[in-house]
Image (cartoon, grey):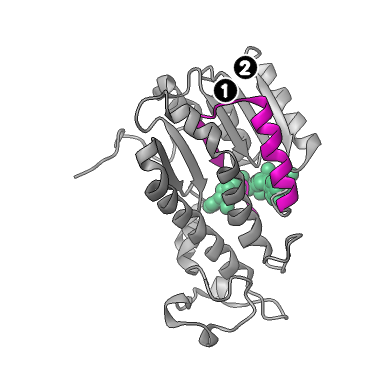
Amino acid sequence: MSTLTHPEWNEKMGGREVAKAFAEQIHGKNVLITGVSPESIGSSIALSIASQNPALLIFASRTKSKLEEVVKSIQDAYPDVIVKVVLLDLMSQESVKVAAKEVSQMTSRLDLIINNAGIMTTARQTTKEGLEGQFGANHIGHFLLTELLMPQLLASASSSDEGATRVINLTSAGHRLSPVRFSDYNWEKSNDEIPEEERHAQLPPKFAKGADDGYNGWLAYGQAKTANMLFSVGLNEKYRGKGVRSYAVHPGCEYPAAQAF
Ligand SMILES: NC(=O)c1ccc[n+]([C@@H]2O[C@H](COP(=O)([O-])OP(=O)(O)OC[C@H]3O[C@@H](n4cnc5c(N)ncnc54)[C@H](OP(=O)(O)O)[C@@H]3O)[C@@H](O)[C@H]2O)c1
């Protein structure tokens, strides 16, 4: 049995048409979106949500000039929408803590957190705390941000309809490339040095080759995107009874890339 609310929609459906169909769930809400730059999924989500009169939009991202550009496009299209920006570098837990504090000073309640920011890199990067960069930014940074803003989510949940307060984690079909290597999340070991249940499957040719230092960025991306999904599972287990729901969503990608997974 299909649980789709709109089975007639397909990949050609635009974000603003979807937002219009769910107008009641956006109107008057306080929404935080991470990873907001021009021509990105984050700015597209922002424009769609702005089209349905939210009470407050907060954009958290790492490049001030890009944030300002998106704010301008929102203000040009929807001048009545209140938009605030916060500088956030998910590669630094200190930055995440500062950003969460700023957000908590902006509002006492959040209805929706959309953890959208993400990196995919084939060369190894490392967070300020020494974590493998894709796991650190795509998952751990968002995990920390969301947990620090849980008081604001719970404040919304306590006075909202069941299921209206949400954390949306942007994952990817790329999660199929690797489970989470709980014993080696920094990718320092080879596939046969880790427990069987943490090993990656046979890789499609496009993803098989790692960098010269042995680091395969696609696998690390896959681990981070699996972690995004498990984060939603964990949030639902821990907070569903308190009214907060989480969904992990793949935003879609061009057909050849989708086929590769
Ligand atoms: N595009 C696809 O085909 C596709 C497919 C599957 C899943 N996804 C997922 O969808 C999400 C959005 O993807 P996208 O295609 O819109 O990516 P994008 O165009 O590269 O945008 C990524 C956003 O994340 C921000 N960001 C990157 N590192 C950050 C950090 N350390 N701290 C704070 N912000 C950071 C970027 O800011 P700057 O621009 O300032 O660097 C940018 O705003 C990601 O989670 C991605 O994994 C995308």
**Numbered circle sitting on residue 50:** 1
Split into 4 quadrants, where in the image is the N terminus? top left
Which residue is at 64% across, 31% downward?
104
Tally of marks: 2
Amino acid identity at mark 2: Val
Which residue is at 76% across, 60% downward?
128
100 is within the stretch colored magenta: yes
Residue 64 percent coordinates (x, y): 79, 36
Secondary structure of the residue carrying numbered label 1: helix
* Mark 2 vs 1, N-terminal side: 1
Magenta residues, start to end: 93-121
The quadrant in which residue 158 appears is top left
Q: In whole angstroms, how far apart are the C-alphas of marks 2 and 1?
A: 7 Å
Viewer-proximal residue among 2 and 31: 31
Residue 140 percent coordinates (x, y): 60, 56
Q: Is residue 139 left or right of residue 87?
A: left
Residue 70 visible (yes or no) = no
79 is within the stretch colored magenta: no
Viewer-proximal residue among 164 and 191: 164
Q: Residue furthest top?
A: 80
Position of 176 relative to 245 (above/below): below
The quadrant in which residue 113 appears is top right
**Numbered circle sitting on residue 149:** none
Residue at image mark 2: 81
Residue 191 percent coordinates (x, y): 53, 83
Q: Residue furthest bottom?
A: 192
Residue 97 visible (yes or no) = yes
Instruction: Bin the neighbour count of mark 1 within 10 Å (Cα to Cα): few under 14, some 14-19, many 20 and up.
Output: many
Residue 131 percent coordinates (x, y): 68, 65
Position of 201 relative to 56 (above/below): below
Q: Residue furthest left?
A: 1
Q: Are marks 2 and 1 in contact (CB under 8 Å)?
A: yes
